[in-house]
Image (cartoon, rainbow, N blue to C red):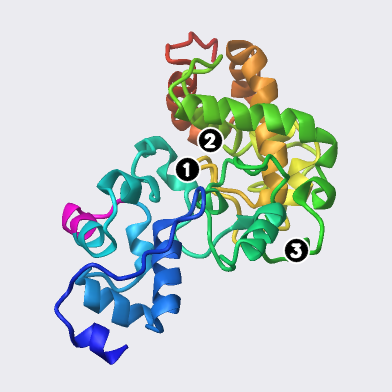
Amino acid sequence: MTMLINAARRPLPVVLDPTPDELLSSWLHRHAAFYGLTEPMLISWLKLESKKLRSLDFRPGLGQIARIVDSFRTDPMDVVAMTHTALPIEVAALVGRGKPIQFCRTCCERHRAADTPGAVLKSWLEAWRVTCPLCGSPLSEIEGPRAGCDTVRNTSPFGDHWDAAKIGEELVNRHLRGEPTPLASPIAMMRLLLILNRPQTTQPPEGYNKSWLLNEIVPGFDAEALRIAPSISKGANAMVPLYLRIALLAGLAVAAKNAADTIQRLRPFCRPVYRKRFDELAYAALGMPLEFSI
């Protein structure tokens, strides 16, 4: 292996096929393991000018793509397809930048059977999913109190909303594919649902920051969301843990049935300090302005 590192950079003699939906960093890691290299050694040999392979997964530079293409004798479009480059900016906050946030048990078994254990899929970093885009199986949590042997359909307290969550997930997928949906932006609607609710008269003062508009559509969301530390963002993005995502996507599906009426109904519950943000997200979700009475 020292000979490989010391040699002038040239195409690798053996190139492993990527698994369907595999992340670029995962594919490169598998080559490092195959050739007995550490991650820094592979990065140095490829002259990728990066500290971590996972930094290539979102928007790799043209020079980095060119060096990978030359060394692995592959098509540049195949390299780009292993990244999240094609995703629109509005969904960037819904893509994890570190370790996978979920996984598919069925695909893991398939990887083991195909002698590609350890492969990481792009969908395992995508926080609008509850099912695997390859096989349709419910996803599972990687860590946390619900990271057992079951899928999120069984472990989430919102399992009763599973069918609605799948509808919400498909709305996002259709939007990202450029297909028409009832909403101009399902992503914006998801963010709107995570804006903080106004204080309820029955709430104690210490609970005033801890209610979300989504709870008006999916009762019980607040009680589960309060367990999250740090707290779920106030509509800045829609990145929530997998087991709460069922509630968020189910809420999206309900809201999309009559989006304008839903927004009109939710706006009075929005705290005044977040009203401007609410209106911006409502405009983005609908693709048109609404006249509000308050």
Q: Are marks 1 and 2 in contact (CB under 8 Å)?
A: yes
User: Which mark is drawn over residue 236?
Assistant: 1
Mark closest to the chain's N terminus, 2 or 3: 3
Residue at the image point whose x is 48% and y is 54% from the top: 22
Q: Residue furthest front?
A: 13
Question: At numbered mark 2, what does the secondary structure look like: helix, strand or loop?
Answer: helix
Q: Main secondary structure of the magenta part?
A: helix
Mark closest to the chain's N terminus, 1 or 2: 2
Q: Is residue 250 left or right of residue 76?
A: right
Mark-to-mark CA distance, 2 and 3: 26 Å
Residue at the image point whose x is 38% and y is 50% from the top: 83
Tell me where the magenta segment starts and ends, as one range: 59-66
Name the image quarter holding the C terminus. Answer: top right
Task: Name the residue tied to disc 2.
Answer: 191
Q: Is residue 199 above or below residue 72?
A: above
User: Which mark is drawn over residue 22?
Assistant: none
Q: Is residue 224 above or below residue 179?
A: below
Type of residue at label 2? Arg
Of circles 2 and 3, which is in front?
3
Q: Residues within 10 Å of mark 1 (few under 14, many from 20)?
A: some
Question: At numbered mark 3, what does the secondary structure look like: helix, strand or loop?
Answer: loop
Q: Residues within 10 Å of mark 3 (few under 14, many from 20)?
A: some
Task: Name the residue tied to disc 3.
Answer: 147
Q: Is residue 64 magenta?
A: yes
Estimate the x, y position of residue 47 in percent, counting from the top left: 19, 72
Q: Are marks 3 and 1 in contact (CB under 8 Å)?
A: no
Q: Is residue 35 left or right of residue 215?
A: left
